[in-house]
Amino acid sequence: MGAYQRISSELTPKKKESQPRTVPSDKPPFTLGTLKKAIPAHCSQPSLICSFSYLVYDLSVCYTLFYIAKSYIPSLPYSLRYLSWPVYWFIQGAFLSGVWVIGHECGHHAFSDYQWVDNIVGFILHSALMTPFFAWKYSNHKHHSNTGSLSQDEVYLPRLKNVGLKEILLLILGLDFVFGTCTGIS
């Protein structure tokens, strides 16, 4: 039996036949350490070639989508243009989100083993996507250091105040941000 089969058989939970499986009620038969040992060491090492291959792939798809949209959508009948542009925006946005994620990984020093490469690639990608890289990198580091803290997190700090009927109605209707009455209900 290979190492993968041995580890995967250790990780497979034993089913109890007497009770239905809706919500796990027992602790899993493995620990976080067992899971970490099951992942080969080379999977957590950044590869410059692999990282750039993902980047080149995403950028080439983005360019191809742009070329197709620029060349063919204007020549479509007028009514089809209204349908084609939103479809293009959605697909292009999905791939550009992937480019942003690669820049995000540069901010976490996960793109390569070289900090200067991560900084250059992250700066170029985030600048192209109009996100300030170094300010975001600092803010994101503080966010990850304080995730889940309502008083220290930089990403979501709810404003706490007395909540009246008007604020509750705006919150329920989803209009609390529109009218500037963002409330943190505790």
Image (cartoon, rainbow, N blue to C red):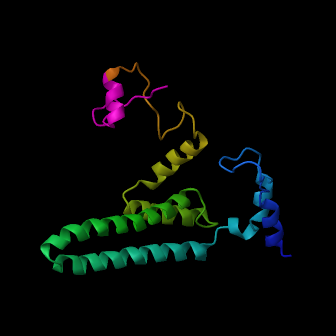
Residue sitting at x 58%, y 39%? 146
Residue 160 x, y percent position in the rendering: 44, 24
121 displayed left or right of 46: left
59 displayed left or right of 107: left
The mark tally for this picture is 0
Image quarter for residue 113? bottom right
Residue sitting at x 77%, y 55%? 15
Residue lying farthest to the right in this orientation: 1
Residue sitting at x 34%, y 76%? 65
Residue 32 x, y percent position in the rendering: 76, 52
In the foreground, 19 or 184: 19
Residue sitting at x 23%, y 80%? 72
173 displayed left or right of 112: left
Image vertical order of residue 142 relative to residue 162, above or below: below
Residue 133 x, y percent position in the rendering: 46, 55
Image vertical order of residue 68 relative to residue 132, above or below: below
Main SS of residues in magenta: loop
* Segment colored magenta: 166-186
In the foreground, 7 or 91: 7
Residue 129 x, y percent position in the rendering: 38, 61
Image quarter for residue 78? bottom left
Quadrant (top left, top right, bottom left, bottom right) of the N terminus: bottom right
In the foreground, 61 or 30: 30
Residue 91 counted in the magenta span = no
Residue lying farthest to the left in this orientation: 78
Residue lying farthest to the front in this orientation: 18
Image quarter for residue 184? top left
